[in-house]
Amino acid sequence: MPSYLTAPRSRPGPRRRSLLTGAAGVASAALLAGCTDSAGSDADERASVARRLRAAAAEDSRKLLGRYDAVLAAHPSLAGRLRPLRAEVKQHADAFAAARSPRSTAPSAAAAPSASPSVAPDPKDAVRALAEAERELADRRGKALLDAPAEEGRLLASVAAAGAAHAYLLTEPEGEK
């Protein structure tokens, strides 16, 4: 009978186990090298960026809230249409303000009085301007996502999507909802 036993094949080069062991060693060295004082300063910088981003987003939401209030004051007949959207914008402002770091002791700009935005005398034009403000802010927030830390990015994405939906609802003729 012929023997079908063959010699085990030996591939040239390093074995898989030695490659994995070497990769694990390199990764461990990289992690250890990253555990220096610069890691702390990087974390502090990221936290600072996050605080600034949230503060700016909260302020933008408060300004948009002011626009809603101005339109509602000038055109009370729009209350049924605008109040639910205004309530969401208020929630956005609160979410950005609440998510700020507790280490931040700067006074909130929410208490600072601001000039009331001008409102078009025609209700349709006022709603159109409000839709444009929502769209512009949603676009800015979408662009800010590119540089935002993960948690802030998720919040910005959610609020930007809501703003885009608000802009759509505001541009939709009232009878077609």
Image (cartoon, rainbow, N blue to C red):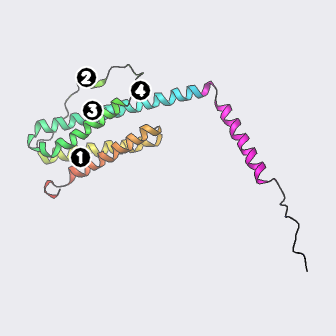
Q: Secondary structure at mark 2?
A: helix
Give residue 41's position: percent from left, percent from top: 56, 25
Q: Residues within 10 Å of mark 2 (few under 14, many from 20)?
A: few
Image quadrant where one finds the N terminus? bottom right
User: Closer to the N terminus: mark 3 or mark 1?
Assistant: 3
Q: Nearer the viewer, residue 4 or 34?
A: 4
Q: Mark 4 — residue?
A: 101
User: Closer to the N terminus: mark 3 or mark 2?
Assistant: 3
Q: Mark 3 — residue?
A: 62
Q: Secondary structure at mark 1?
A: helix
Vertical comparison of 101 with 173: above or below:
above
Quarter residue 101 falls in: top left
Image quadrant where one finds the C terminus? bottom left
Foreground: disc 3 or disc 1: 3
Q: Which mark is residue 75?
A: none
Left or right, 56 with reference to 172: right
Q: Which mark is residue 111?
A: 2
**In the image, what residue occupies the spot 16% across and 55% down?**
173
User: Closer to the N terminus: mark 1 or mark 4?
Assistant: 4
Amino acid identity at mark 4: Ser
The answer to whether the residues at label 2 and label 1 have Cβ atoms under 8 Å apart is: no
Q: CA distance from mark 1 to mark 4?
A: 31 Å
